[in-house]
Image: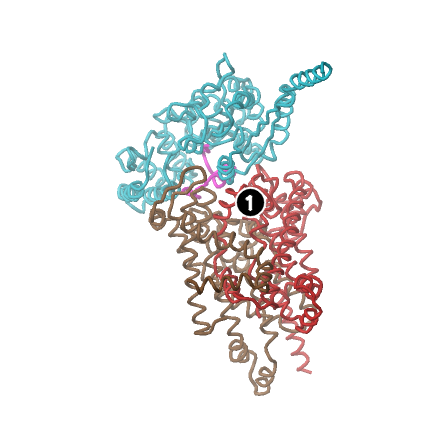
């Protein structure tokens, strides 16, 4: 009898602790949502509003009017799609020989790629900006996307994926006289689709969320992606806190929704990274 | 020399090699342009008076001298070191969270997702939301007042004694979920027999945690700690979205200084010098840690 | 063949006739942080101008102020600068010094005419003898005072000098227990300059001179008697605290631009009803405080042949009528004499509220409103921080004023030695 009460207590306290931490993680989002949906009441009073008052979508409509949110969405989508495509193509191409081909210098190349993980990439912004200016790519989305196409982590993850393909398949294909390209494209690549999806999703989130590099490279604020554009709500001449909140919700909602549907990819990606 | 030429020509003429490098070419080209070139060119530029619109002249160590005489940069270095305080908290917190969620309770998936949400949110949004929380009349002050932990609202982002810690807290908040997932993956690959044997021996949860789990997680802990240390030294995005270096320059970090000088004030050589210093520190730490982790054993 | 020649000449002629229609000149102008509030204003302005000038196509781009400089320099470096860019005076001074702006002396007035800008505005933009921009809007401070509090303190007239203002602050504190004045001591550099006290002379910091020390001593005395609002007195931006206090009836006098006065009207009507306006006493230099002018400058790299049209548009942008309209919308002050003389600013009804009075008082002060700033110093923010901390220590009585200022001067001089001044 007491054992089951103990068990119940244990479970309750577990859920309690889990919930407490979850609240700390989620509360800022909730509060922002509450503010975005409220049209009455003083925002910054004690006790603060935990529930929207005067619910309406007015603030959201105003946010659309105040900053070109639709343009920002479009820009973000463009940048994200291009980055994901570029990364999947270039990194899978690079990971394949490292995994399944014997060639001279493979150790060296691996070393080079690992070295980039140690180099602090944040500092590259300055010079990459100068480079883009010199080759006249500044203020193009190409400039935003190019530096993000190759990352060591993606190459390593895809290499692992390729590693798992049974050698016999390749041997059989090679015996049949298939060229390396055909093997790569027709046989191996389709086999690692789940990994491609993982890398693709991780990349998509990173690309959608990046705000500093696009704001450096792109000249006109209207061409910014959403993550950079939303910051300018704050500095805008007389934007109310509610509208800022609404804009913030509009920025973060798509990613959250996408995340909820694709969680397992993140967890799996982390799995791979840990190994 | 001829041996080198020989090997290069072997490499080049071998069809297999050519093919492999053909596959690797786009990636290598991009890495060269955007990961290696910046390091080389940036280091060179930090010894000049480069500006987008004027001629370039070599100035030797002038930028570095100005850097180390500059109060804001020194504050930045100090703050970047202070930022390291975040590491133990984040790691401990993440391990604990991982242990907490490493079970099959119904709905645990949702809790894990909830803890990961701060990681997938763009930094700019995080900055805006925590700006609300840290407001003088914001929720954080309210909660603390209600719990009688403080007597009057604190200016988390406006008081120069507090602001850095507020920024560090946000960094911690974002890091928890990320490392939690890594530790979770590690935990799930641990063999269960040792835990079971310990339970049979009568060890309680606490003992099991410290005596068995943690030691077995050691490799993961080391890797995560190094990553965390490097991330703390390179912290600057949270500063940009929360305080832009204020109040009174108290939240400058070394890399934020580089970003501010280089891109907001267009003093590119100064920014490059600052980022070079940070890079050196990071690489030094990375080397030391790697050596310590794998003495004589190459990955 | 004659027919061919005829066809060819007709073709050539028609190209010639339509030549101007093909040669549309595009003028791109940049503003700073004016979207979205002024979208209708600028769209209207652009539409009108294009209708009147068929050969011109205007493009309006607005930037948040913190990235404007970066984008501008990038554009100049890439050879595609905008035709006009909205700048603040310190930035213009820096860029003019670097040779990045075109002088516009000859372009300020339409050919054959005279320009109507105030002398102060032009003086602000005169660097090394040449004017580098078309003045747009500015601002100037006025004193908003709480009639009840001042009456209780027995004050009946406007202060004629900073000393008198400080004395009044002390009186208010003694008679009513409330602080009288809340100067922005976080901007002590502007404060000194307005009182005619230089910060730097001949490349050396001189703010530990007897005159400076005397001023800080007066500030310390006022502080001691409670004349100052203590909240955020030395913060970089004490304005929110000041407004809060004034709106709550806890402060005798608030020095700010007329826009802020309007806010009192909406946020605290009872205080508004008892608010009166005084002009800010000009310092011994005769300069009025709060002037922070924005203007339009022509960057280097704009093609010479385009400049006449660009200047024509700039004159239109900053014309009396357009400046007046903008000033009314934004609650700022125009920089042309005619706009300032407009009844909107000058005609005050007998029972006008404080904000109308503020406009009139401000309009009067505009001709002596100058932007006060220190130019040509690297890392100026950092230096200023030392100065503010020294003044804070002195005013709050934590340290001897002379000592604190001496120390700050030492720090400044050490840094200044490495810097070239113009």
In the rendered image, residue A32 lying in the magenta stretch gets the answer no
Chain C: its colour in the image is: cyan
The quadrant holding residue A268 is bottom right
In the rendered image, residue C253 lying in the magenta stretch gets the answer yes
Q: Position of residue A63 (x, y in %)?
A: 65, 42
Residue B166 visible, this angle: no
Mark 1 lies on residue: A215
Chain A: its colour in the image is: red
Q: Regarding mark 1 in the picture, which secondary structure is present there?
A: helix
Q: Position of residue C57 (x, y in %)?
A: 62, 26
Considering depth in this image, is C360 or B239 the residue closer to the camera? B239
Is residue A162 rendered to the left or right of residue C360?
A: right
Chain B: its colour in the image is: brown
Considering depth in this image, is B163 or C274 the residue closer to the camera? B163
Label 1 crowd (10 A; few <14 / some 14-19 / many >=20) = many
Give the quarter of the figure containing the N terminus of chain A: bottom right
Which residue is found at the position 57% from the left and 30% from the top?
A: C28
Is residue C110 rendered to the left or right of residue B59?
A: right
């Amino acid at each position: 009898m007491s054992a089951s009460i103990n068990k119940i207590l244990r479970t309750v306290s577990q859920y309690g602790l889990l919930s407490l931490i979850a609240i700390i993680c989620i509360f800022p989002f909730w509060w922002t949502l509450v503010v975005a949906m409220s049209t009455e009441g003083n925002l910054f009073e004690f006790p603060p509003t935990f529930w929207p008052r005067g619910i309406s979508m007015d603030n959201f409509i105003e946010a659309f009017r105040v900053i070109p949110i639709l343009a920002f969405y479009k820009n973000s989508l463009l940048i994200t799609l291009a980055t994901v495509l570029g990364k999947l193509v270039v990194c899978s191409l690079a990971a394949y020989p490292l995994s399944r081909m014997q060639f001279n210098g493979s150790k060296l190349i691996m070393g080079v790629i690992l070295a980039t993980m140690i180099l602090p990439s944040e500092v590259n912004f300055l010079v990459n900006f100068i480079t883009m200016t010199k080759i006249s790519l500044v203020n193009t989305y190409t400039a935003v996307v190019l530096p993000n196409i190759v990352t060591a982590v993606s190459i390593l993850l895809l290499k692992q994926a390729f590693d798992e393909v049974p050698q016999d398949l390749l041997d059989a294909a090679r015996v049949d006289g298939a060229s390396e390209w055909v093997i790569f494209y027709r046989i191996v690549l389709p086999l690692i689709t789940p990994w491609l999806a993982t890398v693709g999703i991780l990349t998509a989130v990173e690309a959608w969320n990046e705000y500093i590099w696009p704001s450096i490279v792109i000249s006109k604020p209207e061409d910014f992606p959403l993550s950079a554009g939303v910051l300018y709500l704050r500095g805008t001449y007389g934007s109310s806190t509610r509208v800022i909140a609404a804009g913030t919700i509009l920025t973060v909602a798509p990613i959250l929704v996408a995340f909820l549907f694709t969680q397992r990819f993140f967890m799996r990606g982390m799995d791979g990274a840990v190994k | 020399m001829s041996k080198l030429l020989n090997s290069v020509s072997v490499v080049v003429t071998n069809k297999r090699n050519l093919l492999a490098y053909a596959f690797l070419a786009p990636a290598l080209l991009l890495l060269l342009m955007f990961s290696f070139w910046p390091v080389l060119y940036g280091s060179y530029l930090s010894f000049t008076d480069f500006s987008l619109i004027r001629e370039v002249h070599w100035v030797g160590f002038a930028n570095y001298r100005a850097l180390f005489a500059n109060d804001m940069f020194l504050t930045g270095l100090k703050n970047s070191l202070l930022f390291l305080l975040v590491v133990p908290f984040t790691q401990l917190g993440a391990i604990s969270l991982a242990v907490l969620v490493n079970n099959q309770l119904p709905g645990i998936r949702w809790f894990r997702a909830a803890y990961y949400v701060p990681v997938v949110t763009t930094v700019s949004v995080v900055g805006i939301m925590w700006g609300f929380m840290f407001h003088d009349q914001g929720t954080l002050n309210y909660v603390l007042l209600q719990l009688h932990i403080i007597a009057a609202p604190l200016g988390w982002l406006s008081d120069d004694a507090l602001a850095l810690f507020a920024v560090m807290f946000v960094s911690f908040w974002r890091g928890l979920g990320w490392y939690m997932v890594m530790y979770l993956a590690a935990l799930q690959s641990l063999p269960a027999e040792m835990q079971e044997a310990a339970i049979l021996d009568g060890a309680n949860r606490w003992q099991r945690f410290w005596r068995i789990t943690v030691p077995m997680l050691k490799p993961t802990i080391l890797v995560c700690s190094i990553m965390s240390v490097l991330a703390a030294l390179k912290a600057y995005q949270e500063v940009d979205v929360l305080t832009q270096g204020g109040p009174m320059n108290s939240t400058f970090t070394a890399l934020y200084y580089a970003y501010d000088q280089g891109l907001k004030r267009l003093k590119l050589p100064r920014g490059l010098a600052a980022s070079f210093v940070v890079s050196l520190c990071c690489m030094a730490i990375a080397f030391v840690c790697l050596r310590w982790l794998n003495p004589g054993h190459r990955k | 063949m004659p027919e061919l020649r005829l066809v060819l000449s007709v073709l050539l002629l028609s190209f010639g006739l339509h030549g101007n229609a093909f040669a549309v000149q595009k003028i791109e102008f940049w503003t700073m942080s004016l979207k979205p509030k002024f979208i209708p204003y600028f769209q209207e302005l652009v539409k009108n101008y294009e209708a009147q000038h068929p050969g011109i196509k205007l493009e309006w781009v607005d930037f948040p102020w913190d990235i404007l400089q970066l984008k501008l320099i990038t554009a100049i470096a890439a050879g595609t600068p905008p035709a006009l860019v909205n700048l603040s005076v310190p930035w213009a001074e820096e860029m003019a010094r670097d040779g990045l702006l075109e002088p516009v002396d000859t372009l300020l007035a339409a050919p054959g005419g005279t320009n109507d800008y105030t002398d102060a505005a032009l003086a602000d933009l005169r660097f090394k003898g040449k004017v580098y921009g078309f003045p747009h809007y500015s601002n100037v401070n006025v004193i908003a005072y709480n009639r009840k509090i001042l009456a209780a303190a027995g004050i009946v007239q406007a202060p004629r000098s900073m000393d008198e203002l400080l004395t009044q602050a002390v009186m208010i504190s003694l008679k009513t227990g409330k602080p009288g004045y809340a100067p922005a001591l976080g901007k002590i550099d502007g404060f000194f300059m307005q009182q005619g006290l230089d910060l730097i002379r001949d490349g050396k910091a001189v703010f530990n001179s007897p005159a400076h020390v005397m001023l800080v001593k007066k500030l310390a005395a006022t502080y001691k008697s409670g004349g100052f609002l203590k909240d955020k007195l030395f913060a970089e931006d004490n304005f929110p605290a000041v407004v809060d206090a004034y709106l709550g009836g806890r402060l005798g006098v608030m020095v700010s631009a007329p826009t802020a006065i309007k806010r009192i009207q909406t946020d605290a009507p009872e205080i508004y009803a008892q608010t009166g306006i005084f002009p800010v006493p000009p310092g011994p230099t005769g300069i009025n405080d709060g002037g922070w002018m924005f203007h339009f400058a022509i960057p280097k790299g704009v093609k010479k042949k385009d400049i006449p049209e660009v200047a024509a548009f700039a004159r239109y942008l900053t014309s009396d009528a357009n400046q007046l309209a903008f000033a009314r919308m934004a609650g700022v002050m125009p920089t042309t004499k005619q706009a300032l003389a407009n009844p909107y600013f000058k005609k005050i009804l007998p029972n006008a509220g404080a904000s109308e009075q503020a406009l009139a008082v401000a309009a009067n002060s505009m001709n002596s409103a100058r932007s006060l700033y220190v130019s040509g110093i690297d890392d100026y923010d950092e230096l200023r921080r030392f100065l503010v901390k020294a003044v804070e220590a002195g005013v709050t009585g934590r340290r001897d004023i002379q000592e604190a200022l001496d120390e700050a001067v030492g720090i400044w001089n050490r840094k200044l030695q490495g810097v070239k001044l113009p």
